[in-house]
Image (tube, rainbow, N blue to C red):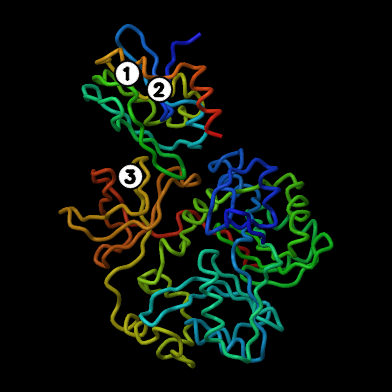
Amino acid sequence: MSNRKYSKDHEWVTVEGDVGTVGISDHAQEQLGDVVYVEVPEAGAAIEKGGQVATIESVKAASEIYSPVSGEVVEGNAALADEPGTVNSDPHGDGWFYKIKLANTAELDELMDEEAYKTYLDGLD
Amino acid sequence: MTEQETGTKTTPLNALHRELGGRMVPFAGYDMPVQFPAGIMKEHLHTREAAGLFDVSHMGQVRLRGAAAAEAMERLVPVDVVELEPGKQRYALFTNESGGILDDLMITNAGDHLFVVVNAACKDQDIAHMRAHLGAEVTLEVLEDRALLALQGPRAAAVLARLAPEVANLLFMTGSDVEIDGAVCFVTRSGYTGEDGFEISVPAARAEALAKRLLAEPEVAPIGLGARDSLRLEAGLCLYGHDIDTTTTPLEGALAWALSKTRRADGARPGGYPGAEVLFGQFANGVTRRRVGLRPEGRAPVREGAELVDSQGRRIGQVTSGGFGPSVGGPVAMGYVEKEHAKPGTAVQAMVRGKPLAVTVTKMPFVEQRYYRG
């Protein structure tokens, strides 16, 4: 159903036109546990693929989020500041992190589709 | 305790942890559950609202026997052990020659012996330390064949009393032999959460059955090491190797209350333990830094290792434990600051990912302690 693509670091991106929406996978939120704080990038930030773009904190630890694509941030999800738990309850929906104007759509081809990501996860166990 | 091929040790509850869906991690050489499917947040809140069951069998349990055991132990800790009454438990610290802390421990006068519990990560070193210094007339027995369960929370007493009514008579920091579900256990009314509760030393062969029996009670849920850490942090309790270690003295660590009056310079049995002169000097002249509670503004947790600076950006200390406090509903931390900044209410800053965050020095605990004192 979706054109959702995944990175090996467990970020996802969906694309509409030339704007991608980025979040973390259900697997990632489950591994992190209860999310208590999220720091998302601000509009205008220039991001490199693989660059550190956001921070997510669970009760136990802080983790860095790496951008699966390059581009310029259009919007950070401000709602996560007050409701960080949305990342746990709706990681593929309202728990998105930021929207980004893609600099290079060819980067999407280097990411995994739903099925390839599932196979990748099975290989991690 | 058995060793797997990896060298990682397991507790008698290892199979049960896996059966309960525990997420297993290596901790102090043991394969331990960091959390169960409920997750750290729910486990933490459940413990504060009802009762949580913790496996702390990785900790070291030791019996000291001999008429001179208490006197000998006083050579290692700045604490009154000789006058510790039968059935009473006391918090203690092994000190080194510079007044630093080798480990923190619990000592209970069990009548015909002293029952000692030490930290998992330090236990080999603690046992060697005791063997080296307690002398030939004290017999040291490491209780390898016993598990240690902690039942903590406001419903813990009601739950345990269903299995053993006499535990209702135990007060905070006391202990006794109690038969639970057919097993003779040594039970103390103490713990590491700030809540009322018990630590139950049970024969290894009976540990799983007892854990299952307790988990069958509606108020009890299994709790992992993650929530154990957030609970003790909110309670303002030190984690050895983080908040206290060989480079911090009990006075710097805000643990002067644990140094018995009798063992101080003007006490009846002053000194006679490692580092006594250093501690006497700090009692007389004060310390230059002190462990304090820290309350960060906003929601971002401030974690271990974060540097603390004053309003001019000058380094004044460091965070030693920090995270999110589920019961507080926000970030909490503790750390060391120069004494000029140690007063509650003082505004300082913590450097987090290169940015200063506003933090207020705060009295601990962060949550009300609910120990049962009768």
The quarter holding residue A84 reads top left
The subunit carrying tag 2 is A
Q: Residue at x 77, y 61 (%)?
A: B205
Q: Is disc 1 surrounded by few (<14), some (14 to 19) or many (20+) residues within 10 Å?
A: many
Q: Horizontal and vertical percent for residue B290?
A: 33, 67
Q: Single out the residue that lies furthest toward the front.
A: B5
Numbered tag placed on residue B27 in the rendering: none
* Image x and y of residue A79, in percent: 38, 25
Residue lying at 36% horizontally and 87% vertically, measured from the top left: B277
Q: Where B318 falls versus A82 (above or below)? A: below
Drawn side of residue B101 relative to residue B314, left or right: right
Q: Nearer the viewer, mark 1 or mark 3?
A: 1
Q: Secondary structure at mark 2?
A: loop
Callout 3: few (<14), some (14-19), or many (20+) C-alpha neighbours within 10 Å?
some
| Amino acid found under the numbered disc labelled 1 | Lys
Mark identifier at residue A99: 1
Disc 2 marks which amino acid? Trp
Q: Secondary structure at mark 1?
A: strand
Label 1: chain letter: A
The disc placed on residue A96 is 2
Chain ID of residue with mark 3: B
The mark lying in front, picked from 3 and 2, is 2
Residue neighbourhood size for the residue with mark 2, other residues' Cα within 10 Å, grouped as few (<14), some (14–19), many (≥20): many
- Judging by the rendered image, the residue that carries numbered circle 3 is B297
